[in-house]
Amino acid sequence: MLRIVLFLVLIALAGAGAAWVADQPGNVVLTWGGWRASPSIPVFVLCLGIFAVLIVLLWSILTTIWRTPGRMRRRRHEKRHARGRHAITHGLLAIGHGDTALARRHADAARRHTPDDPLALLLHAQAAQLDGNRDEAQRAFRAMAEREDTRLLGLRGLFIEAQRADDAVGAVMIAEEAIKLSPSSTWASHAVLGFRCARGDWSGALAILDSNLSSGLIDKQAYRRQRGVLLTARALELETMDRDVARESVMEAVKLAPTLVPAAVLAAKFESEAHQVRRAMKLVEAAWLANPHPDLADAYAHVKLGDAARQRLQRVETLAAKTSADKPGHVEGQLAIARAAIDASEFARARDVLSPYVNNPTQRVALLMAELERAEHGDGGRARAWTLRAVRARHDPAWTADGYVSDRWRPVSPVTGRLDAFQWQTPVASLPSDKGTTIESSAFEEAMLAAPPPKRVTAANEAPAEPVVIAPAESPVATPAPAAQDNAPPATKEEAVATSAEPVKPASEAAESSPAAATPVFRTRADLGKPASAPIQPVIPIVRAPDDPGIDDDGPSDEFTEQIGTPKAQAGGWRGFWSRWGA
């Protein structure tokens, strides 16, 4: 509406001006050489306007002719640029769905039409990577690194290529160059931080961490945790070389990350050595509430140097009772009590604590049961059976990071270089499957666990307990095995087959044998005093460990080696002669 009003106002002004010029009297005299003209003022103004329009038209024509070559060049450049952008777009789409040939063709077209476009260089490098041509990809990334606008992107590509070529030194040098250009580069700071941690340069790693905080890459809480991890790693390394620096580092680390298990253990050790028992106990208790760990229990038990085993047991029981609301009666506390009870010769207490876990034991539970059987009863057979069970038992929690299981805590993951990656958890490979399949124990292992433990000799004139004797069966009737005792797991199908299988005998021996003269396959200690109807030939069972490679067929013979099957005797006489000649 405003434009219409303004247009009408301009027309009115123009009309008023034309009327005013038309009303002016007089003439204009123009003289040029012998030519003379004297038009009126309205005619002169009209001629002057026509002349101005002609001048403008002529200038426009001349300008258009002058600018035509530049416009043609610019239009041709725009067409090439449009074709290059079209090739870049479709090339990136081809890389996205993995078409190597199409991506290469579009990359060549983009490079031909727009050689200076950074996206064309990126497409060329990614097409070379997809095609597996590392040399060409490196050349493209070097060209990008030489440009000001794509330098960081080119360094990133060279860093990836160095990693693929297992050139750790070259990768770190490229990452350090990228940090100089852009301190807020996440990938470069992550790579340099992991390399300095792997090299043990904790001061350099702490400097990178401070730079990450100032650049805004991490928040304050993550910075405190990661700084505590780096200080703990430095303290563990300097524990035997420079104890003053190690103590200072770990004390700062435990303030920044009070739930970090290695920091709490080492700080409690230093406080205990300085006779600051209460401080050491508080440090361990704070970490225990967040993450119960066997190292914390051990540090808490030995917080007072020179204490007796029973005092350590009482202290561990106190720590095990200090569990959080979401982790009541944590298994780590129970295993710590069992460990301290065995050391204090409180075998009944240890057995009572381990009883809920023996039906489906972990490796540590099985090893504690083996040690308990050996320490309480001196039963080497049952101890070996529990040790064999530990080989096939479920895994206990361990320090795990990105699928890598370590026997000790580490500040950085060796797989990805991620800081503070190790967690105390059960390895993924040991988790039960969806089908719920478990490895059953062998029949011999179940039989050894089911046998009652031998009694210790208390009197001087008392004879030692005799070993169990296994005699060859002479009757199909078998005596069942004794019931399981002392937290032994129930017998499996294999055990039942081993105890009730009928031996194969010749017909002559079957006719002479009778039920009254039957001898049990497994004789118990109560049967040793009874007279046997036939001479007993002792047989020593030989059990191989699960990792035993077995017996070589060509190896030297041994009189104690178990013979599998019946040895084939060499025929004599004419039969032997003809058998040697293949007759």
Image (spheres, rainbow, N blue to C red):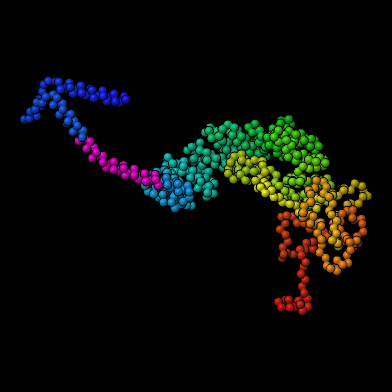
Closer to us: 385 or 175:
385
Residue 208 seen by the camera = yes
* Residue 233: quarter of image: top right
Q: Is residue 471 above or below residue 250?
A: below
Instruction: Identify the residue at image location x=74%, y=64%.
Output: 556
The quarter in which the N terminus is drawn is top left
Q: How many marks?
A: 0
Residue 272 seen by the camera = no
Q: Residue furthest left?
A: 34
Closer to us: 251 or 420:
420
**282 falls in the magenta region:** no
**59 falls in the magenta region:** yes
Q: Residue furthest right?
A: 461
Residues rendered magenta in the picture: 58-87
The quarter in which the C terminus is drawn is bottom right
Instruction: Identify the residue at image location x=88%, y=53%.
Output: 525
* Dominant secondary-structure state across the stretch colored magenta: helix
Left or right of residue 73, residue 497 in this image:
right
Q: Is residue 470 above or below residue 40?
A: below
Instruction: Identify the residue at image location x=66%, y=39%.
Output: 236
